[in-house]
Image (tube, rainbow, N blue to C red):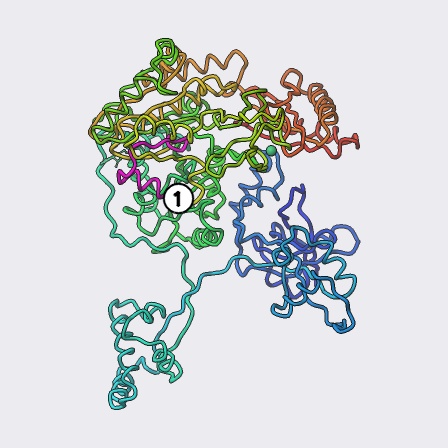
């Protein structure tokens, strides 16, 4: 019989597939897309994914073999392999890295070292250390323990030495074991034993119980059980806990009924994500202009695979999406609906479930890994002939792209301009929007990009007819766009009218809103506003010991924290430089605004929405619910408040500091400023009443602000496009950023210089740098950047090939082997 081999993907940053022999007993089980357990390296075993099956023995040496096949059915399909290949080529990373990012944690398995007690030693004669005693004692209870469990047990972070010695002395055994992390949730149910399917058998049973006075309890229990059973015609069993909760039911009577063979107890696997219970309603009737937009989109799709829907805030883009979704699922195809930050989707989930009920699945990082596997499986099991699928429509963050779709018909990328579509770290450093377009193309599906403030890239694509373009220029229900007031901070400062960081215009507007019982949003940019400590005497500022950044002061927990590496320090009582006791909090973050605005409006109920206050799904939902139910008057927040909140009662929006946005040193800062200001303005006056926006700035005449005031996206787009022409910035060109890092600063510098020279020989003036980045040291590694700027018309595939060649040449100098190079294609 011919030998069979599989080429597998390992979840590592290694460039190739690895070949393993398939032992005969597994030959019937293997299939492309199934996971297998393979040995790799000295000790480790991994779960790997079969990508190819063949009979070509590589070389003549001894072959490693697969150890087992994990799946009954493939968990990854051809479409996914195709997407991963494209991503690895386009984003310059390995397919293993893409796979690592694509599979939910519960489907990824890595070996875990398990510890067991050895039996060969004589406990009487062996002298044990304290740690060994604790471990062996614990192992009497449990057969085996993971290293992590032992670390917890000993309250130590590194037990390697302890285990090594115990192993050498034959006290313990260690093995590598794969841990299957996904565990289905089970519920215990109760049904009639099959003998009682017959009506006559039931009648006999009841007669018997009625006649036996000692069995009244059982009879009562049985009555309750039957009442539940017949409540719903579809029901053939009752959940045990529900039954036991009933007051006439005792645990012992249930147990007796089971032991007497009348009832049977069994487990059912249930979904972790409960079904919405509400009745479905029909999508709303579209307004005339929405209807027109829908028709135009459908027309655009006759010629284009991608269309951009540019609709002002509150124009009802979501309603248009809903109509397209309805048509797509009617054709029996799947829909992927991407959102930038899933944080704010609660409102949208509810909205979609009203129309599509349990056809809507949700997939994002705030869901547990087990919940994600369930959505994954629903998507995997979809077939067009299916009556019902719990995830025919998936609402998700960018990672939802990786689900095992087989028949996508529509991909929606809402708020397509949003930066959080981009994954920064680790590889693949991909843009969810661009990847979505490719994914849709592979499925012959349509892509809909939606935004009030499209990215320059997408708008240029639409203008140059690569995408279809459809516009919605009015708000739903004829609500006017908000009135925008530019408050001149310089002027107010000169006249000494500022109240802390607030202009009289803003204070007055808040005042009015509050007295009308309306709500207020105050926006402060996240970047560059965090609080830090500064010594009033010597101006010393505490820095991170691992990174070249100042430590952020957290008032609530009273600590200093590095936002790059997580380093935490207690707040010093005196300056560590000069010993002076006057250490002040500087900066003006959301926390500070919350504190100061309370001084001016002591009656108002104020809350804050930023990364700190929304760590969990529940805390975020609480803020949103409190705001919606008007238990909050003023909501202070970062970027988060700009995104998609749809509340009726907000009439005032304050942008605390527009200059920080405009002056940020990045060629995209104008675009970001326009988008943020327009989006946050869009939160105001969405129903009935016209909203008002106060922009506080030192540059009231700035053209970007003028465009925001005039609600002139096209004007802004044209002007910014010209601004970027001077240095041929994107979208006139495309960028690839190479980052080098090393623990030795000089070596990092030298390496960057050499690599840049190699690149320049091939790509000439397209190479910029090396530069030392703004934050030049993170986690004790020193950073250098090299930018490759490629003409929009040139082939980026070719450029990437050249870059890879140069990197290979670079590593020929063995002294650079420890230098890491990361590539970021289309950096944001
Ligand atoms: P956008 O996504 O463009 O910001 P939304 O879709 O959230 O706008 O719509 C704004 C508001 O107008 C929502 O409260 C929505 O329910 C309402 N709305 C939009 N279109 C309709 C419609 N055709 N019928 C009734 N209400 C609508
Ligand atoms: Zn740090």
Of residue 378 and residue 817, the one placed in the foreground of this image is 817
| Picture coordinates of residue 670, whole percent (x, y) | 45, 18
**758 horizontally vs 145: left or right:** right
Magenta span contains residue 624 = yes
| Picture coordinates of residue 580, whole percent (x, y) | 58, 25
Instruction: Indicate whether 389 appears above or below 499.
Output: below
> Which image quarter has ligand 2?
top right
Of residue 52 and residue 358, the one placed in the foreground of this image is 358
**201 horizontally vs 568: left or right:** left
Instruction: Indicate whether 800 appears above or below 188.
Output: above
Quarter holding residue 812: top right
**Residue at 41 percent of width and 61 percent of height:** 270
> Which residue is the site of mark 1?
619
**459 horizontally vs 159: left or right:** left
User: In this rendering, does residue 605 appear at all?
Assistant: yes
Instruction: Indicate whether 315 appears above or below 154.
Output: above
**In this picture, which residue range is highlighted in magenta?**
620-642
**Residue at 51 percent of width and 57 percent of height:** 182
| Picture coordinates of residue 593, whole percent (x, y) | 39, 27
| Picture coordinates of residue 95, whole percent (x, y) | 61, 42
Q: Determine the secondary structure under disc 1.
A: helix
Of residue 137 and residue 687, the one placed in the foreground of this image is 137
């Amino acid at each position: 019989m011919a030998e069979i081999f599989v080429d597998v993907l390992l979840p590592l940053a290694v460039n190739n597939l690895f070949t393993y022999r398939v032992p005969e007993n597994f030959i019937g089980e293997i299939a492309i897309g199934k996971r297998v357990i393979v040995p790799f390296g000295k000790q480790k075993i991994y779960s790997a994914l079969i990508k190819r099956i063949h009979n070509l023995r590589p070389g003549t040496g001894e072959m490693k073999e697969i150890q087992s096949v994990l799946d009954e059915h493939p968990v990854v399909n051809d479409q996914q392999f195709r997407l991963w290949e494209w991503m690895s080529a386009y984003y310059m990373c390995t397919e293993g890295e893409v796979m690592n990012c694509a599979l939910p944690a519960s489907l990824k398995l890595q070996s875990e070292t398990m510890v067991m007690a050895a039996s060969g030693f004589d406990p009487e004669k062996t002298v044990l250390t304290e740690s060994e005693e604790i471990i062996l004692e614990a192992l009497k209870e449990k057969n085996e323990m993971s290293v992590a469990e032992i670390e917890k047990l000993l309250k130590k972070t590194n037990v390697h030495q302890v285990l090594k010695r115990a192993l050498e002395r034959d006290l313990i055994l260690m093995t590598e074991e794969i841990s299957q992390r996904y565990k289905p949730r089970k519920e215990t149910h109760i049904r009639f034993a099959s003998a009682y399917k017959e009506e006559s058998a039931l009648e006999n049973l009841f007669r018997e119980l009625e006649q036996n006075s000692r069995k009244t309890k059982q009879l009562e229990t049985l009555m309750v059980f039957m009442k539940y059973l017949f409540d719903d015609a579809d029901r053939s069993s009752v959940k045990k806990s529900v039954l036991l909760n009933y007051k006439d039911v005792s645990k012992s009577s249930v147990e007796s009924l089971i032991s007497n063979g009348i009832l049977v107890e069994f487990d059912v696997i249930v979904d972790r994500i409960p079904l919405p219970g509400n009745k479905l309603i029909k999508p709303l009737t579209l307004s005339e202009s929405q209807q027109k937009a829908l028709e135009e989109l459908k027309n655009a799709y006759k010629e284009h695979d991608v269309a951009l829907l540019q609709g002002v805030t509150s124009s009802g883009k979501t309603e248009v999406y809903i109509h397209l979704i309805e048509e797509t699922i009617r054709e029996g195809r799947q829909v992927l609906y991407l959102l930038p930050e899933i944080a704010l989707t609660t409102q949208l989930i509810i909205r979609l479930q009203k129309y599509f009920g349990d056809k809507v699945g949700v997939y994002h990082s705030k869901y547990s890994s087990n919940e994600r596997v369930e959505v994954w499986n629903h998507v995997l099991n979809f077939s067009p002939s299916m009556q019902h699928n719990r995830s025919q429509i998936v609402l998700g963050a960018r990672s939802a792209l990786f689900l095992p779709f087989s028949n996508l018909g529509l991909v929606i990328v809402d708020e397509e301009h949003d930066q959080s579509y981009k994954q920064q770290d680790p590889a693949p450093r991909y843009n969810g929007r661009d990847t979505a377009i490719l994914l849709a193309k592979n499925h012959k599906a349509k892509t809909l990009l939606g935004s009030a403030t499209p990215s320059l890239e997408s708008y240029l694509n639409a203008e140059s007819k690569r995408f279809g373009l459809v516009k919605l220029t009015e708000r739903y229900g004829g609500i006017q766009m908000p009135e925008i007031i530019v408050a001149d901070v310089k002027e107010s400062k000169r006249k000494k009218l500022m109240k802390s960081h607030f202009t009289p215009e803003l204070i007055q507007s808040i005042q009015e809103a509050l007295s009308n019982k309306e709500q207020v949003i105050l926006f402060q940019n996240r970047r560059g506003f965090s609080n830090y400590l500064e010594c009033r005497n010597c101006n010393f500022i505490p820095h991170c010991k691992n990174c070249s950044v100042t430590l952020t002061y957290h008032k609530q927990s009273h600590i200093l924290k590095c936002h790059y590496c997580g380093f935490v320090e207690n707040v010093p009582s005196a300056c560590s430089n000069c010993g002076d006791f006057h250490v002040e909090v500087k900066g003006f973050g959301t926390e500070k605004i919350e504190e100061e605005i309370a001084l001016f409006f002591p009656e108002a109920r104020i809350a804050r929405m930023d990364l700190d206050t929304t760590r969990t799904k529940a805390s975020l939902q609480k803020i949103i619910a409190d705001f919606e139910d008007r238990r909050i008057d003023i909501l202070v927040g970062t970027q988060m408040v700009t995104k998609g909140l749809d509340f009726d009662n907000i009439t005032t929006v304050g942008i605390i500091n527009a200059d920080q946005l405009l002056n940020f040193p990045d060629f995209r800062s104008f675009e970001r400023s326009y988008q943020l200001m327009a989006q946050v303005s869009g939160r105001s006056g969405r129903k009935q009443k016209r909203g008002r926006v106060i922009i506080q700035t030192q540059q009231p005449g700035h053209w970007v602000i003028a465009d925001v005031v005039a609600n002139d996206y096209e004007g802004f787009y044209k002007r910014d496009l010209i601004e970027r022409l001077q240095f041929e910035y994107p979208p006139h060109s495309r960028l690839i950023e190479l980052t080098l890092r090393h623990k030795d600063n000089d070596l990092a510098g030298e390496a960057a210089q050499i690599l840049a020279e190699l690149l320049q020989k091939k790509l000439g003036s397209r190479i910029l740098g090396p530069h030392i980045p703004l934050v030049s040291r993170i986690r004790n590694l020193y950073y250098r950047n090299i930018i490759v700027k490629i003409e929009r018309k040139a082939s980026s595939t070719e450029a990437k090939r050249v870059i890879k060649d140069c990197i290979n040449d670079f590593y020929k100098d063995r002294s650079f082997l420890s230098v890491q190079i990361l590539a970021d294609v289309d950096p944001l």
